[in-house]
Image (cartoon, grey):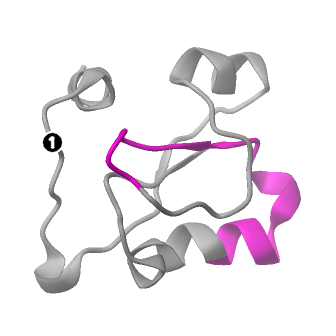
């Protein structure tokens, strides 16, 4: 499962895009914050849906400029913190 965070720029999700393109069988879906405006073409899922689809790993598939992780306060951020 690929996590796109709150990305609004396709360059920010190049890690997720690389996995989706070069290892399409390795990712069952993508998860993103509501603010996220980009996609790597996989079905949007919750963590529970991803697990049900066979996901065993959640990949942080984004990289913000400057190496920071900006996670807005939302349901996904709370799940990731847990």
Query: Taking 52 as reference, is 58 above or below it?
Result: below
Residue 41 is a magenta residue:
no
Where residue 7 appears, x then y in whole percent?
35, 63
Residue ranking furthest to the right? 25
Residue depicted at x 44% and y 55%: 4
Q: In this view, does 5 lie to the left or right of 11?
A: left
Residue depicted at x 39% and y 53%: 36
The quadrant holding residue 28 is top right
Q: Is residue 41 left or right of residue 14?
A: right
Where residue 14 appears, x then y in whole percent?
51, 79
- Residue range highlighted in magenta: 18-36
Q: In which quarter of the image is the C terminus?
A: top left
Where residue 31 appears, x then y in whole percent?
52, 40
For this rendering, which residue is in front, 23 or 65?
65
Residue designated by label 1:
72
Residue depicted at x 55% and y 24%: 46
Query: Taking 69 as reference, is 18 above or below it?
Result: below
Residue depicted at x 51% and y 74%: 15
Residue 21 is a magenta residue:
yes
Q: In this view, does 51 lie to the left or right of 25?
A: left
Q: How many labels does the image show?
A: 1
Query: Taking 49 as reference, is 3 above or below it?
Result: below
Where residue 6 appears, x then y in whole percent?
31, 53
Which secondary structure lies at badge 1? loop
The quadrant holding residue 43 is top right
Mark 1, Cα crowd under 10 Å, few <14 / some 14-19 / many 20+, is some
Q: Is residue 21 left or right of residue 71?
A: right
Q: Quadrant of the N terminus?
A: top right
């Amino acid at each position: 499962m690929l996590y796109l965070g709150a990305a609004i720029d396709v360059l920010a999700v190049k890690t997720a895009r690389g996995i989706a393109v070069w290892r399409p069988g390795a990712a069952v879906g993508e998860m993103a914050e509501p603010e996220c405006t980009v996609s790597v073409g996989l079905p949007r899922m919750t963590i529970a849906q991803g697990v049900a689809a066979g996901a065993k790993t959640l990949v942080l598939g984004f990289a913000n400029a400057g190496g920071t992780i900006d996670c807005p306060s939302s349901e996904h951020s709370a799940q990731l913190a847990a």
